[in-house]
C-alpha cells in the first residue's frame, strides 16, 4: 500500500483529496495546524466532507516553521500539496506560505526520496501569472528538484463562486465589466480525482476545468434561478474597479494581491479541458438549502 502525505488537508480541495486517496486504497497522512484539527471532523462551509475517519495518521505542524516539520515525509511515497493562503494570518504573506511553506515541504520530500510530488497551482494565463508569482516560483523549485512531479492547473473551484450565490440571495449580483468572459470551474471532488490519478500520470502539467463553460453573467443568472428570484445584475466598469484595487495597495499588499487576482480573473477567459461530472447548478442547489436553513434559524 502506497503512503501519501496531504498538505492542505483541512481546505476545500484538500478534504476531497483525502477522501479520494482513501477511496483508491492509499494510506493517508494529513499535515494539519494544531488550531485547525477540529476542521477534520466537520463538514466544511462549501459542503466539503468531514475526513477524520479517513486519515491514517495526523502530523501536526506549521509549514512556515520548519522546526515543526521534522519527519513529515518519512516513509511517504507521494506528497500532495494545495497549501496557500487566502486570508492574512499571523503576519505571514504569500511568499511565506505559497512559496516558502511549500518549499519547506519539498526539501523534506527530497531528503526522504519520495516517488512523486503533486502540486496545485492555477491555470496559466499571462495576466494572472504575475499575481500568483509565489506559487509559480515554487513550481520552478519543484521542476528543478529532480523529483517526479505533476502540476495541476484548475480554472477555479466551485467554492470560489459561492459569493455569487450569497449576493443573489441578498438581492443583487455585482459583476466586473460586461460579464462576457468565460470560465469552467470544477467541483472539489472532480478535481480531487484528477489529482489522485496524477500519481500514475507521465504529464508534468494538467490543466483542467469542469464540464460546463459559463460566462460570468450566466453564473449570476444561474444563482438567481436556483433561488427562484428574478435576476438583478449590476455591472461595474472594469476601469473603475482596477483603479480602486490599486488604491488598496498602500494599505495592504495582501488584500491588494487578492483583489487584483479576482478582479483580473473576471476580465479574462479561464477555460481548460472539460472534465468531471458535478455541475455548478447542482452545487448551487445544495448550497442554497444551507443558506435557506441559516436564514430560517436567524428569524426564529
Image: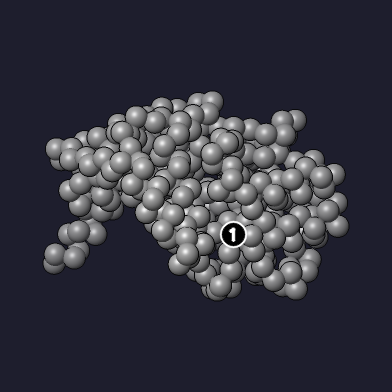
Q: Residue at x 37, y 54 (%)?
A: 244
Instruction: Tell me the element at label 1.
Output: helix
Q: Residue at x 25, y 35 (%)?
A: 221
Place residue 52 in its image quadrant: bottom right
Describe the colour scheme in one phrase. Answer: one colour
Front residue of 116/253: it is: 253
49 displayed left or right of 282 = right
Residue 271 seen by the camera: yes
Mark 1 neighbour density, 10 Å: few (under 14) some (14–19) many (20 or more): many
Q: Residue at x 41, y 30 (%)?
A: 182
Place residue 111 in its image quadrant: bottom right
- Whole-percent x and y of residue 263? 41, 45
Quadrant where the C terminus lies? Answer: bottom left
- Whole-percent x and y of residue 243? 39, 50
Residue that mark 1 sits on: 94
160 displayed left or right of 155 = left
Residue 18 seen by the camera: no
258 displayed left or right of 169 = right
Q: Residue at x 22, y 40 (%)?
A: 233
Note whether 13 is above or below 67 in the view shown.
Answer: above
- Whole-percent x and y of residue 226? 23, 38
Front residue of 64/253: it is: 253
Amino acid at each position: 500500500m502506497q503512503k501519501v502525505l496531504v498538505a492542505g488537508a483541512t481546505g476545500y480541495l484538500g478534504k476531497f483529496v483525502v477522501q479520494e486517496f482513501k477511496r483508491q486504497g492509499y494510506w493517508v497522512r494529513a499535515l494539519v495546524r494544531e488550531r485547525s484539527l477540529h476542521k477534520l471532523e466537520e463538514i466544511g462551509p462549501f459542503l466539503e466532507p468531514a475526513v477524520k475517519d479517513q486519515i491514517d495518521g495526523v502530523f501536526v505542524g506549521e509549514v512556515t516553521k520548519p522546526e515543526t516539520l521534522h519527519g513529515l515525509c518519512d516513509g511517504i511515497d507521494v506528497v500532495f500539496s494545495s497549501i496557500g493562503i487566502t486570508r492574512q494570518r499571523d503576519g505571514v504573506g504569500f511568499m511565506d506560505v505559497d512559496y516558502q511553506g511549500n518549499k519547506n515541504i519539498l526539501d523534506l520530500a527530497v531528503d526522504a526520496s519520495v516517488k512523486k510530488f503533486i502540486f496545485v497551482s492555477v491555470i496559466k494565463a499571462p495576466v494572472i501569472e504575475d499575481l500568483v508569482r509565489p506559487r509559480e516560483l515554487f513550481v520552478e523549485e519543484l521542476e528543478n528538484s529532480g523529483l517526479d512531479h505533476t502540476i495541476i492547473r484548475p480554472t477555479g473551484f466551485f467554492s470560489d463562486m459561492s459569493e455569487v450565490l450569497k449576493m443573489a440571495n441578498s438581492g443583487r449580483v455585482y459583476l466586473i465589466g460586461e460579464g462576457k468572459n468565460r470560465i469552467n470551474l470544477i467541483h472539489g471532488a472532480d478535481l480531487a480525482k484528477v489529482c489522485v490519478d496524477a500519481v500514475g500520470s507521465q504529464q508534468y502539467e494538467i490543466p483542467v476545468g469542469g464540464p460546463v463553460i459559463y460566462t460570468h453573467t450566466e453564473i449570476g443568472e444561474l444563482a438567481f434561478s436556483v433561488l427562484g428570484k428574478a435576476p438583478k445584475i449590476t455591472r461595474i466598469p472594469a476601469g473603475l474597479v482596477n483603479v480602486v484595487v490599486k488604491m488598496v495597495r498602500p494599505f495592504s499588499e495582501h488584500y491588494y494581491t487578492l483583489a487584483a487576482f479576482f478582479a483580473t480573473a473576471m476580465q479574462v477567459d479561464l477555460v481548460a479541458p472539460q472534465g468531471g461530472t458535478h455541475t455548478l447548478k447542482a452545487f448551487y442547489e445544495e448550497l442554497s438549502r444551507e443558506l435557506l436553513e441559516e436564514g430560517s434559524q436567524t428569524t426564529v
